[in-house]
Structures are given as C-alpha cells and as structure tokens.
Amino acid sequence: MEKHGYDVTYLGIGCDGKINLEELEAAITDKTGLISVMFVNNEIGTRQPIEEIGKIAKKHGVLFHTDGVQALGNFRIDVKEMNIDMLSVSSHKIYGPKGVGALYIRKGLRISNYIHGGAQEMKRRAGTENLAGIVGFGKAAEVSMHNFDWHVKHCSELRNYLVEEILNKIPNTYLNAPLEDRLPGNANITFEFIEGEAMLLYLDSHGISVSTGSACSSASLVPSHVLTALGVPVEKIHGTLRLTVGDFTTKEDIDYTVKALIEVVDKLRKISSVSEQKGW
Ligand SMILES: *Cc1c(COP(=O)(O)O)cnc(C)c1O
C-alpha cells in the first residue's frame, strides 16, 4: 500500500507479543481506512486481542482485516462477533492441500478486483478455480472443526511438555513470549551461546524439522523482525529455534527431540565462538 502512496503506521508489540490497544486507537486518524493485524503470529504464536481490535475498528468506522492463517483450527473464530471485515486463511496449515486459501469478505463490503481478465469470483479473481484444492480445503476445514478440542488439548499438552523438558534439562535456555494466549503447538526457544542454523542442520540430520525465524524467510540470515520487535537482542535471535508440534506428534517424538537437543547444544557450546567466556 505504501508503494501505492498510502501512509502506513506500524505498531510495535509489548514483551507479551501483543500490540498495545491504546497505541492502536491513538494511531487512528480521520484518514485511516484499514487496520490489519495478524490474528496469531506464526513465529512466537501470540494471539492478538482480536475482539478488542474489532471493537476499536468498528467504533472508528475503519475496516478490519486479519491474517487468520495460524488461527484457523487453533482458536475459535467468529467473524461477526469479532467485527472482522476480512479474514484470510490458508488450507495447508490445517492439513489441507497446498496452494489454496480463502479470503472472507463481509457481506456488503466491496473490494476491487485483484486478478483481472475473467469473470470468475464475481470478476474479483480472474482465472479458473482450483476445484480439487477448494474441495480439499473444505474437507480439511470440516475435519479440523470436528477435531478442534482434541487438537488443541493434544498440541498444547505436548508443547508444554517440550518446553518444560528443554528449560529444565538444558541450561541457558528460555521461552520467548508467554504461554498464555498462544498457538497450542508453538514453542519459540532461545539457546544462548549457540548458532541456530548449526542446531537446525544437526537436528535435520536426525530427522527433526525445526526452523529459525519463519519458514517464509528460511533462506535468509536477517534476524527475525518478530523477535526483534519483541526486544530479543540479535545474538540471542541467532540462537533461537521455533519448534512446533502437530496432530501426528507423539510424546516419544518429544523425548527423541529433547535428547538430540541436549547432545547438539552440548557439542556446539563446546566449540562455540559465541561463548559466555568471550563476553556475549
Ligand atoms: C503460512 C502463513 C501465511 C502464508 O500462507 P501460505 O498459504 O503458506 O502462503 C500467511 N500468514 C501466516 C500467519 C502464516 O502462518
């Protein structure tokens, strides 16, 4: 939008990972047309106060869009109750097929077409629909709703166990952002005096997939903007891993992962240039 000449105000987050509602409200001017806030962050798993943001948007007559990709299947979403005008979601994050997503647009709200040419989707999105993808997404949504309570319990219990095990068994580790209001399967942990990339490669060779930063920027070594906004210093960001559990993760998987982590952390700290002794 900035490229199209709009002014954009970026809001920071507190140490709880959430935006400040007073700051949000104070940033609204008579020119403000849109508020867009992620429902749930994909790196640290923080759920934003969507209900309150929706109320503020409504009070000021500003449209409210939220990226609900991580929220889908993990938190109750009620677009009406939450005053959400637009909600974007993606299929593969709920075990549906890749390459298909959806944008909810409140009835009565008119948006301009963004893929021009054909008359599909009421001329808003030209191009032949990916029917198999759409049907697959629909089925995945149905399964996700059916499994909702089980999924949330399963993932949060395993995640809590994973966090507890790491923090108890590996010294100089800590969890970024609180466990409250957090994506059930998400843990984001800093291992001090270590390079995350080295940990990632070692774990990968043991069949464990983790990420440093978000998957979308996995090819870059630029420190995560999310952790930067959270106030994590840069050398600690480089020692940070995002570990996530899902429906198919078992307690044995967690034990296996913690064991591998203990090994790799020990190995790397012995040879680390980012050591405590060297003043980091
Ligand atoms: C994965 C993700 C996206 C991107 O969705 P894709 O369908 O993978 O392109 C956007 N926002 C959030 C919060 C995500 O987690």
Image (spheres, grey):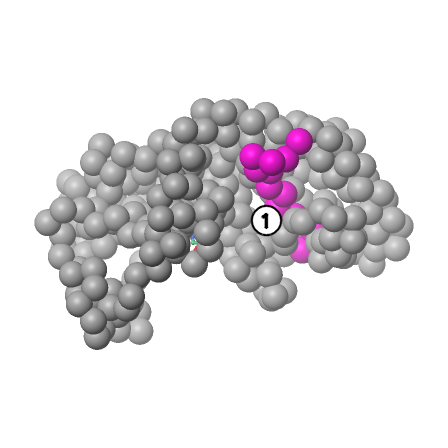
Q: Residue at x 56, y 27 (%)?
A: 154
Farthest residue to the front: give it. 132
Q: Quadrant of the N terminus?
A: bottom left
Give residue 170's position: percent from left, percent from top: 78, 36
Q: Residue at x 10, y 49 (%)?
A: 108
Where 245 falls versus 111 (above or below)? above
| Residue located beneath label 1 in the image | 232
245 sits to left or right of 68: right
Q: Is residue 12 magenta?
A: no
Q: Residue at x 55, y 50 (%)?
A: 227
Asked whether the viewer can see residue 255, the reply is yes
Q: Is residue 239 magenta?
A: yes
19 sits to left or right of 111: right
Asked whether the viewer can see residue 27, the reply is no
- Label 1 Cα crowd, 10 Å radius (few <14 / some 14-19 / many 20+): some
Check disc 1 and give the amino acid type.
Val
Give residue 12's position: percent from left, percent from top: 41, 50
Magenta part of the protein: which range?
237-250
At numbered mark 1, what does the secondary structure look like: helix, strand or loop?
A: loop
Give the number of marks.
Answer: 1
44 sits to left or right of 119: right
Give residue 90's position: percent from left, percent from top: 40, 50
Front residue (pair 43, 135):
135
Give residue 232's position: percent from left, percent from top: 59, 49
Q: Residue at x 61, y 32 (%)?
A: 159
Where 277 falls versus 245 (above or below)? below
10 sits to left or right of 250: left
Mark 1 residue CB less than 8 A from any atom of ligand 1: no
Farthest residue to the left: give it. 108
